[in-house]
Image (cartoon, rainbow, N blue to C red):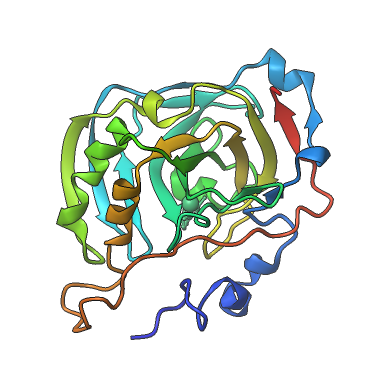
Amino acid sequence: MSLDWGYTDDNGPSTWAEKYPLAAGARQSPVDIDTSKATSDNSLVDREIDWSYPSNCSYRIVNTGYGWRVDTYGDDTALSGGPLSEVYKLEQFHCHWGATNDEGSEHTVDGKSYAAELHLVHWNSEKYSSFKEAASQPDGLAVLGVFMEIGNADNAELEKIISLIPKIIHKGQDSQASFDLDFGSLLPESKHYWTYLGSLTTPPCNECVIWTVFKEPITISERQLEVFRSLKSVGEEDAIEPEEGKLVKNYRPPLPLGNRVLRECGP
Ligand SMILES: COc1ccc(C[C@H]2SC(=S)NC2=O)c(OC)c1
Ligand SMILES: [Zn+2]
């Protein structure tokens, strides 16, 4: 069964606009962050970006066919400040990676790719009544982008997620888990970031995201990244060869920033 869209040569990012016209818009994500174009903005410094996530929360981790996604039940989560004018609730988080460690992130910095990129997706629950409605609005979503680089140590918080991946190897599988997830540990120590107006990085590519990309990466071990790559993009019932259908690449390459403003907070 042929996928509507994906990351292979015949259904990858360069073909998306055929079925998803928004993919050809002028406010698309990701972008290459040209640090020489970033402008400082005191208003970002005055209203520090702030998040509060509960320590003990129940989660559902699912294999979307394009990667893993952890659905949170964002009741007592909040993201505010920085480029945001309202309070946003955490809806889900997920990750993008590549077949080798020299690619994998969606945003790049002066042309440099990281090995992976974590996306924490929030929606404007102050202005809109549902995530779905927010995803059709220009200020509907706020996504935190966190670069991941290879380090020697395992990332302890990610390990809690990685331990569940063997249960969701095939597309459509999910696992309910309630564990103490300290989101604060999934974010870098430094709150320095770049921010710009962009879009969903997969179809339907809605231009509804206020992006905040942290400057400091977190680390993940090679072993942990290999576990991500062991996920399959096909269901258990799809008869394919064992090595086929592995989710080794699920990132969209950068799109032009065009005449959008790229602001930064912190050196
Ligand atoms: C409303 O329909 C969608 C569709 C896809 C995604 C996931 C994409 S968007 C992103 S950023 N990274 C991704 O992989 C959504 O996430 C909010 C929302
Ligand atoms: Zn994403």
Residue 129, visible in the rendered structure: no
Residue 202, visible in the rendered structure: yes
Res. 174 image quadrant: bottom left
Left or right: 56 in relation to 259: left
Left or right: 94 in relation to 30: left
Quadrant of the frame with the C terminus: top right
Res. 106 image quadrant: bottom right
Whether residue 166 is situated above or below residue 119 in the rendered picture: below
Whether residue 210 is situated above or below residue 86 in the rendered picture: below
Residue located 53% across and 50% down the image = 135
Residue located 38% across and 40% down the image = 220
Residue located 33% across and 34% down the image = 153
Whether residue 143 is situated above or below residue 193 in the rendered picture: below
Give percent across and percent down for residue 231: 27, 62
Give percent across and percent down for residue 201: 55, 57
Give percent across and percent down for residue 102: 52, 55
Whether residue 231 is situated above or below residue 71 in the rendered picture: below
